[in-house]
Amino acid sequence: MNSDMIVNLGPLAPLVGIWEGDKGIDVARIHSKETETKYREKAVFEPLGPVNNGPQVLYGLRYSTTVWRLNESDPYHEELGYWLWDKDRKQVMRCFMVPRGVLINAGGDAEIESKHFHLSADVGSETYGILSNQYLDETYKTKKYLLDVTIHDDHSFSYEEDTQLWIPVNKAIFHHTDKNRLEKTG
């Protein structure tokens, strides 16, 4: 991987590599009950770019994340997607899908040297938005997605995620949250 590519990743550059963490906490609804699950995960970030959209030039990371409940060998969550950096607009983006049929394109402001990003997406937005399959749209509609990422000086990063789901049977928003701290392993 060439050093020009890394420089062009802006604030995403420290994330290149393989990361693992076993301090994850997931709060979700399972069988109509709020449930806390402790988990471990592995994330892989590979550089890509430039991606040219006419005059817009993006650099980014192709990523995958796999999550396992502690002491289980089969994963219970996976994601595939991209982290992107738009230097001219000072925007960090995360575009990903989960195999439940949900797609999220979240974004937020950042500087080249930023060590913290706040990204968001809203259902119905034409820029940073959310799409769900028909069943989930009717039963657990994702209305809002919030993500805070902090890159630490000790070769680790942490995140806190809040996926806000509208559950018609309860007539309320449920905050499905995840947080973890991952260390660079490769």
Image (tube, helix red, strand yellow):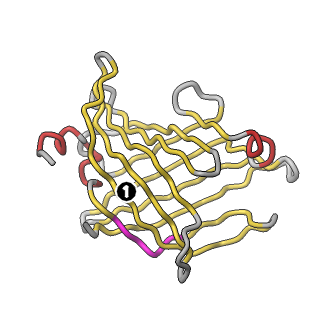
According to the image, label 1 marks what residue? Answer: 150
User: Which x, y percent locates residue 127?
Assistant: 52, 27
Residue for point 52% across, 32% down: 128
Q: In the image, 142: left or right of 14? A: right
Which three-letter amino acid code belongs to the residue tagged 1? Thr
Q: Is residue 69 left or right of residue 4?
A: right
Q: Dividing the picture into quarters, in which one does residue 181 lie?
A: bottom left
Look at the magenta stretch and give its main secondary structure: strand
Query: Most extreme residue toward the left, as rendered?
Result: 3
In the displayed structure, 11 sits above or below 186; it is: above
Task: Please say whether residue 115 is one of the residues in the magenta stretch.
Answer: no
Depth check: give the residue in front, 87 or 131: 131
Local packing at callout 1 (Cα closer than 10 Å; few below 14, some 14-19, many 20+) is some
The spot of residue 70 in percent (x, y) is 53, 79
**Mark 1 element type:** strand
- In this picture, which residue range is highlighted in magenta? 19-24
Which one is nearer the viewer's eye here, 25 or 75? 75
- Residue drawn at point x = 47 percent, y = 49 percent: 80
103, 169: nearer the viewer? 103
Q: Residue at x 67, y 55 (%)?
A: 175
Q: Left or right of 168: which side holds 175?
A: left
